[in-house]
Amino acid sequence: MIEAKGLTKRYGETVAVEDLSFRVRPGSVTGFLGPNGSGKSTTMRMIMGLDRPDAGRATIGGRPYTELAWPLREVGALLEARTFHPGRSARGHLAALAAGGGIDPARVDTVLETVGLASVAHKRAGSFSLGMAQRLGIATALLGDPAVLLFDEPVNGLDPEGVRWIRELLRSLAAEGRTVLLSSHLISEMALTADRLLVIGQGRLLADTSVAELTASGRSLEESFFALTQGAAMYRAGGVR
């Protein structure tokens, strides 16, 4: 399980995330939905220990990421597509991570097959398209066979077939009992992929609900999302925190 309690992050006078609290439970895909610049990526970076919160804390299985004994085997994440040495092959990149993370080397070929990169495993990763780089990032997240997974905008650069593939992959991972947090600003894709939604606007949590509950009034998910985010923007514009 992922848990955030009172997360706050400021960059100078800009508040990126403010007093954000939520839980992401295993067994379902939890969508982290918000407009660009709403604080989604900053929150995921704080969960992964890449940014230090100014207040609050984020834990995975009750512990901060930095205290995990074997992080790659406990948590997998795709936060940026091209986090690899461009001169290494896809297989070489994954093999190095496996060696450093105490992961069975056999997992390298397994995840390359899973993400559809087996045929280009020995090509330089620097020559990959954005879609192929995304697939390599997903392979990296899956490498340690972790119980907790975070994906930040994983469909960027994927063609329609790739989008369907990642949708099915995420749902299958959740069905295995894993904790899956999926960040996106694509409302239509969230409607097809997520079971639960964390809606964020201007760094604050606007809703923690299911897709069914959010659309129970007869509104589409897009209409409900617009109403939430616009209401939050007007609330802030009025000077109320």
Image: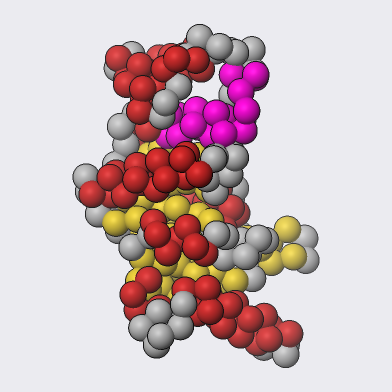
Residue situated furthest right in the rendering: 13
Residue 122: percent from left, percent from top: 50, 9
User: Which quadrant: the N terminus?
Assistant: bottom left
Q: Is residue 141 above or below residue 168?
A: above
Side (left or right) of 60 relative to 13: left
Is residue 191 in view?
yes
Residue 199: give x, y in percent of width and height: 50, 70
Give the left or right position of residue 21, taking residue 79 as reference: left
**Residue 153 among those drawn in magenta:** no
Residue 170 is left or right of residue 172, and the answer is: right
Look at the picture and state if 13 lies above or below 167. below
Instruction: Give the quarter of the image for residue 95.
Output: top left
**Residue occupying the point 35% across, 55% down:** 29
- The correct choice, above or below, for 216 with respect to 127 in the image is below
The magenta-colored residue range is 125-141
Q: How is the image coloured?
A: secondary structure
Q: Is residue 130 found inside the magenta-colored segment of the image?
A: yes
Q: Residue furthest top?
A: 122
Residue found at x 64% / y 71%: 202
Q: Residue at x 37, y 71 (%)?
A: 211
Estimate the x, y position of residue 209 in percent, counting from the top left: 37, 73
Q: Main secondary structure of the magenta part?
A: helix
- Looking at this view, name the residue that lies furthest to the left: 176
Instruction: Pick whichever, 25 or 35, lies toward us.
Output: 35
Q: Quadrant of residue 156?
A: top right
Q: Position of residue 7 (x, y in %)?
A: 53, 63
